Image (cartoon, rainbow, N blue to C red):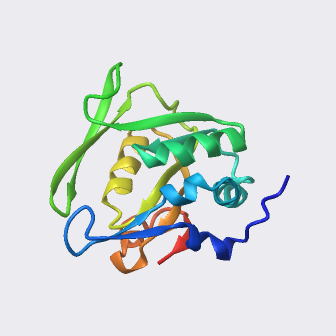
Amino acid sequence: MASSIKKTDLKKHIRDVQDFPKEGIVFKDITTLLQNKEALKKSVDLLAKKFRKENIELVVGVEARGFIFGAALAYKLGTGFVPVRKKGKLPYKTRSVTYELEYGKDSLEIHEDAIPAKTRVLIVDDLLATGGTIKAVTELVKEQKAVIAGLAFLVELKFLKGKNKLKDFDVYSVLKY
């Protein structure tokens, strides 16, 4: 059954939270969208539609909210799912990348055998801000000699220009602010 909600209505399901996680930030809270079955379904359907013909073999989701959309997309596209986690959270041998945040450094990991060479991969996260996290994830995926078919986001904060760090990739965002 098709979702009755329109793409133009999705922003109504995202709540702005002032001064989170720190003063001066307006946080785009997607938990209100996730609670609404029609809005969630429409979001996943729109992400899947964009990449349906790209022969995606694996979806890579970034901790934590990227797991929500990544797993749903993997199901919708008929692929497997690979989690990229914060350091120390994966149980097997990993590859790691450390990257700069606006307030310090962070590290992400992927299992060293998670993606066979030449596999067509879609990388998914809930939000594109500065692009640092996803740029780091692309490095992890490229180390495994996979083909990055695209990068998918529910929300893009255009004013932060994260897309500029990702010029080598097909970047798709359902909603832009």
Q: Is residue 175 above or below residue 115?
A: below
Residue at 42 percent of width and 73 percent of height: 157
Q: Residue furthest right?
A: 1
Q: Where in the figure is residue 107, as x and y percent of width and height? A: 24, 43
Q: How many marks?
A: 0
Q: Where in the figure is residue 125, as x and y percent of width and height? A: 47, 53
The part of the image, by quadrant, that contains residue 13 is bottom right
Q: Is residue 146 left or right of residue 7?
A: left
> Is residue 150 in sight in this rendering?
no
Q: Is residue 30 left or right of residue 57?
A: left
Q: Where in the figure is residue 21, as x and y percent of width and height? A: 25, 61
Residue at 79 percent of width and 64 percent of height: 4
Q: Is residue 45 left or right of residue 115?
A: right
Viewer-closest of 7 and 112: 7
Q: Where in the figure is residue 116, as x and y percent of width and height? A: 52, 30
Q: Is residue 162 left or right of residue 153?
A: left
> Is residue 166 in sight in this rendering?
yes
Viewer-closest of 167 and 83: 83
Residue at 38 percent of width and 48 percent of height: 137
Viewer-closest of 158 and 6: 6
Residue at 50 percent of width and 62 percent of height: 169
Q: Residue furthest left?
A: 104
Q: Is residue 2 above or below residue 86?
A: below
